[in-house]
Amino acid sequence: MSGGNLPPAAARALLEWQIAMGADEAIGEIAVDRLAPPPLSRQIPPPSPPPQVGEGQSGYPPRDKEGGNVGTPNIVAPPAALVESLAEAAQSARLLAAKAGTIEALGEIVAAFDLCPLKRTATTTVFMDGNPAARIMIVGEAPGAEEDRQGKPFVGRAGQLLDRMLAAIELDRSKVQITNVIYWRPPGNRKPTSAEIASCLPFVLRHIALARPRVLVLAGGTAASALLPTGEGITRLRGRWFDLAVPGLDKPVPTLPMFHPAFLLRTPERKREAWRDLLALKARLDQPG
Ligand code: URA
């Protein structure tokens, strides 16, 4: 605003009023359109397109031998800094996991691990529940809201169904140990990303090695795809036995993927298949050894 043709006293009064209102800068006579594009000479170049990769690749920017990005754009990649920090997290998790000599020590290492970004938004670390000496191990996806509140896996509605499924084959939490492929609740219960899973996986594998389970149950597609490199979905995997090679174990672990209890709550017509899988699990456990 300018004083225009005001008498000096009025112009001064106006200026003093403007200063009292917080104006701290003199501006020109001609109004500035701040929404107009800047003159060509000052234009900032448009952002270059995000790094992308070709179909069938990892989802990360393809790299040439020197580490520079190459390749045909088609899938948007996550920010390189995040990818690199998650890769470092996985590397650090591998070194730390190897130091754990007991499941309890592993739990303490996991609780102190700060490199998985999900930890920042979660309330608690959810490591395991059940009996650390049990030789039946169940691995699920990630904590939900109730698990995040209580610090224990599978204590919400899906967990209650899991307890009923176990009871149907004469098992309970004193006879199994339960964990997840992720120890911190993803915001809004979203699916964990493969990089987040990779940052926790060394701990999960170490837990399996320390537990030396007779059987391992993978509850749901996320746990199955994290531990079984078949590329198949849970509908195809469930009910089939796999021999999972785990670093530190001299024998592979008989592993049974099953539907996740949360999926069964949403899709009760699939409980028939889950019942069949539970019977297969019981038959295996009834075998000597
Ligand atoms: N779903 C999971 O996969 N894990 C939990 O701990 C709870 C719900």
Image (cartoon, rainbow, N blue to C red):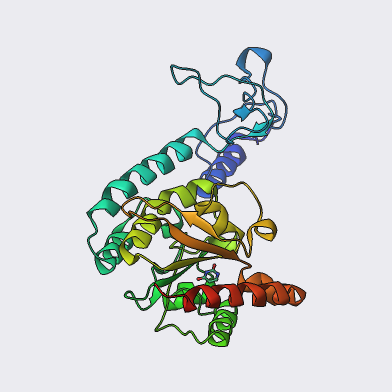
Position of 176 relative to 68 (above/below): below
At which x and y percent is residue 39? 67, 17
Q: At 70% across and 76% down in the image, what residue appears?
A: 271
Query: Looking at the picture, does residue 277 appear above or below residue 207?
Result: below
Task: Report whether residue 141 is seen.
Answer: no
Residue 5 appears in which quarter of the rendering? Answer: top right
Residue drawn 67% across the image and 70% down it = 263
244 lies above or below 78 = below
Q: Left or right? Give the position of 125 relative to 256.
A: left
Which quadrant of the figure has residue 207?
bottom left
Instruction: Tell whether 31 sits left or right of 163.
Output: right
Say whether residue 276 is visible.
Answer: yes
Determine the residue located farthest toward the top in the rendered image: 41
Residue at x 27% of width, y 65% of height:
108
Quarter of the figure that contains the C terminus: bottom left
Q: Tag count in the figure?
A: 0
Q: Position of residue 129 (x, y in %)?
A: 40, 76
Which of these two is toward me, 230 or 74? 230
Residue 128 in which image quadrant: bottom left
- What x and y, as percent, mark residue 131? 36, 78
Residue situated in front as seen by the camera: 84 or 3: 84
Locate residue 220, reporting x and y percent: 60, 64
As rendered, which of 86 and 8 lies closer to the eye? 86
Q: Residue furthest right?
A: 269
